[in-house]
Every structure is written in C-alpha cells, then in structure tokens.
C-alpha cells in the first residue's frame, strides 16, 4: 500500500482525500515508479471540478511527475530499474507515492536536471514548445500577447519567445508578477487590474494588433484577446483558469480573417517520437540557459488541497511542485 490523493466527488480543493491505495505490479510494457516530485498543473483543477471528465471515477489526479523506476514488466527493454524518469500527460494518476506507467511514456532525465525541476517543467515546458514552434511558429519580428505571463507556462513562454526574437506583451495581476514578467523577457507588461489590456495593446502596436495571443485565462480575457489580434492573427486558447469562454460564432472571426485553435499537449505528443523530440527540445533550452525554471512553491503531497487553493487564488508564480 502507498499513499495517494483520491477524488470521490467533484468540487473544490476539499474533495482531495489522502488515503492508502493498492498499486500492484507492472504488467506487460509497464513500469513502476517511486515518485520524487509531482508537478501541479491547472488541468488538475479542471478534472477535480469536472470541467474536464476524468477517464475513471473515483480517480487520482495529476499528469506530471518524476522519480525512480523500481520495477519493470515483461517486454520493457529501454527502461530499467534505477533509471530516473519523468512523465507528462496520460495516464492520469501522478498524485501518489508510487505509480504504474506505460514504459513508452517514460522520459529519461538528463543527469543535469533534478527530478524536482523536471516535475515542474515537463508539462509546462513542452506546452510552451508546441505553442511557440507548432501551433504558431514564432519568428523574429512577431509581436505576441501572453496572458498570465508570470505563471508556470507563461514564464517559460516569455523566456523562449525572447530567444526567438519576438516582441512580447505580457499581462499580470500584481506588481510583483510584473517584475518577474519583465525579468523573463516581456518588453511590455500590463497589469490588467489597473489597465484595460485591449487599449494598451492597441497603443503599444500603434493599432496594428498582435500576431498571436496565447490565452490560458479563458472567460475573462477571451473576447479581449480576439480584439487584440491583427488581420489574420492567431488566437491560441490553451486554458480557462477564469472559466470556460462563451461560445464564439464563426462570423465573429470573419471581419479580420482570424484563426482560432484550442490545443492540448496530449495531442502534440501522441507518438513516442513526438514526446521525446518535444522533451529533448525543452531540455536543450534549459541546458543552454534559454529557459530558467522557477520552482517557487513546494508543498507536501498530503497538502495538495492547499496547493490547489493557492494556485486557483493566484497566490503562486512560476512552477508548483508536490513532494511525496
């Protein structure tokens, strides 16, 4: 038996229950991992609240962790006991001391990257990678809008986009977060609590608008993000921390011939080749100094409810990690 967080009913952070669970032994093509660190992601709160439907119920949340392989099943050839690996995406179930994983979802960690750092960056870093290099390929001369610029993904987006030669406009909610966003490469920072971000973006771009808006906030910013786009601009809605945006009729995109996409990391790392290539690019940018990962908050795994509450009330910056 090991300890894990379980969800038996949908709701607030208080529905997370700390209890004993039976893990079992790895089957064909599987490995058993003793987690050293677990990444906290906003998607965990979506499953807890029922915004997204969990594949099983009751369930153990969590889609990102790093740890040591302690057992391997039959047919596993490229992972062995003692390896330090990370994982991001499916299957859900990272909020546990130990877990069973498909071996083909395991990512070997470079010796230079600590498991705590890996658990804080795999999902967020790979998300930043597909957003900047695949959803919309950011190049020198582009102007981009990043909401929640001091958040876990936002921080990495700004750092990476700066290295690509983009002009970055970031939105934040506090002066402290504005300072971090500036440090991470934002050329212009807007505190949306004090300013109308649409008016400021219009002013900054001399009325032209931005090439792409990266919006993880959702309901509170969605319509404003559309208004900030230039002709043939790209609206990339990849989260909804403030709630699900209202439906948008296709006719609303027509006046400026806008593009709209709602991507997810899982659909950009479907094959093992995609997964490993994406992770390798993140690791390379960490090792070269392009990405500086901030693990600003750690909580015991048993206090995941408090971590969820702090994340949802915007008390956190950078990455948040749960420690078994």
Image (tube, rainbow, N blue to C red):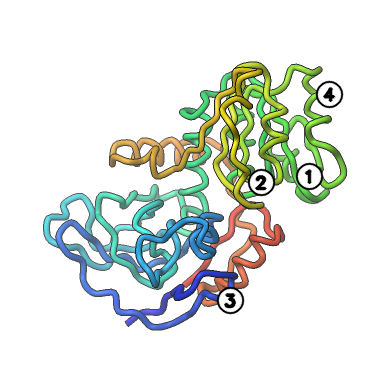
Callout in the foreground (4, 1): 4
Tell me the SS state at disc 3. helix
Mark nearest the camera among 3 and 2 is: 2
Which residue is pictured at 76% across the width and 48% down the height? 177
- Label 3 to label 2: alpha-carbon separation: 24 Å
Question: What residue is drawn where x is 39% and y is 72%?
Answer: 58
Side of 156 relative to 228 (left or right): left
Alpha-carbon span between mark 3 and mark 4: 43 Å
Q: Position of residue 95 (x, y in %)?
A: 44, 68
Report how far apart the C-alphas of labels 4 and 1 lie in the structure: 21 Å
Instruction: Determine the secondary structure under disc 4.
Output: helix
Q: Quarter of the image holding residue 146?
A: top right
User: Residue 53 vs residue 29: left or right?
Assistant: right
Q: Which residue is mark 2?
A: 219
Pointer 4 residue? 203
- Residue 179's tag is 1
| CA distance for labels 2 and 4 | 23 Å
Residue drawn at (51%, 72%) of the image: 301
Quadrant of the drawing holding the N terminus: bottom left
Say if 302 sits above or below 218 in the image: below
- Residue 274, how many percent across, how many down? 33, 36
Residue 320 appears left or right of 275: right
Label 4: how many Cα within 10 Å (few below 14, some 14–19, many 20+): few
């Amino acid at each position: 038996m090991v300890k894990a967080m379980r969800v038996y009913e949908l709701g607030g952070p208080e529905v997370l229950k700390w209890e004993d669970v039976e893990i079992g032994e790895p089957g064909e093509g599987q490995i058993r991992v003793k987690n050293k660190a677990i990444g906290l992601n906003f998607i965990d709160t979506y499953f807890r609240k029922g915004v997204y439907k969990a594949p099983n119920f009751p369930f153990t949340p969590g889609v990102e962790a790093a740890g040591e392989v302690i057992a391997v099943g039959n047919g596993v050839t490229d992972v062995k006991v003692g390896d330090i690996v990370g994982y991001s995406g499916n299957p859900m179930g990272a909020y546990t001391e130990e877990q069973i994983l498909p071996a083909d979802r395991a990512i070997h960690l470079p010796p230079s990257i600590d498991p705590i750092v890996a658990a804080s960056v795999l999902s967020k870093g790979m998300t930043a990678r597909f957003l900047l290099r695949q959803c919309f390929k950011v190049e020198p001369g582009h102007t981009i809008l990043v909401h929640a610029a001091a958040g876990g993904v936002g921080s990495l987006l700004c750092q990476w986009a700066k290295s690509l030669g983009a002009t970055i406009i970031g939105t934040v909610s506090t002066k402290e977060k504005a300072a971090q966003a500036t440090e991470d490469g934002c050329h212009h920072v807007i505190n949306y609590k004090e300013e109308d971000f649409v008016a400021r973006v219009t002013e900054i771009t001399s009325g032209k608008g931005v090439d792409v808006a990266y919006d993880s906030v959702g309901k509170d910013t969605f319509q404003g993000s559309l208004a900030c786009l230039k002709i043939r601009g790209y609206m990339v809605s990849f989260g909804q921390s403030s709630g699900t945006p209202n439906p948008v009729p296709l006719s609303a995109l027509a006046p400026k011939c806008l593009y709209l996409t709602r991507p997810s990391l899982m659909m950009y790392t479907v094959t093992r080749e995609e997964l490993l290539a994406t992770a390798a690019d993140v690791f390379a940018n960490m090792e070269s100094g392009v990405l500086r990962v901030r693990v600003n908050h750690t909580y015991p795994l048993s206090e995941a409810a408090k971590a969820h509450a702090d994340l949802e009330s915007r008390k956190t910056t950078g990455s948040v990690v749960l420690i078994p």
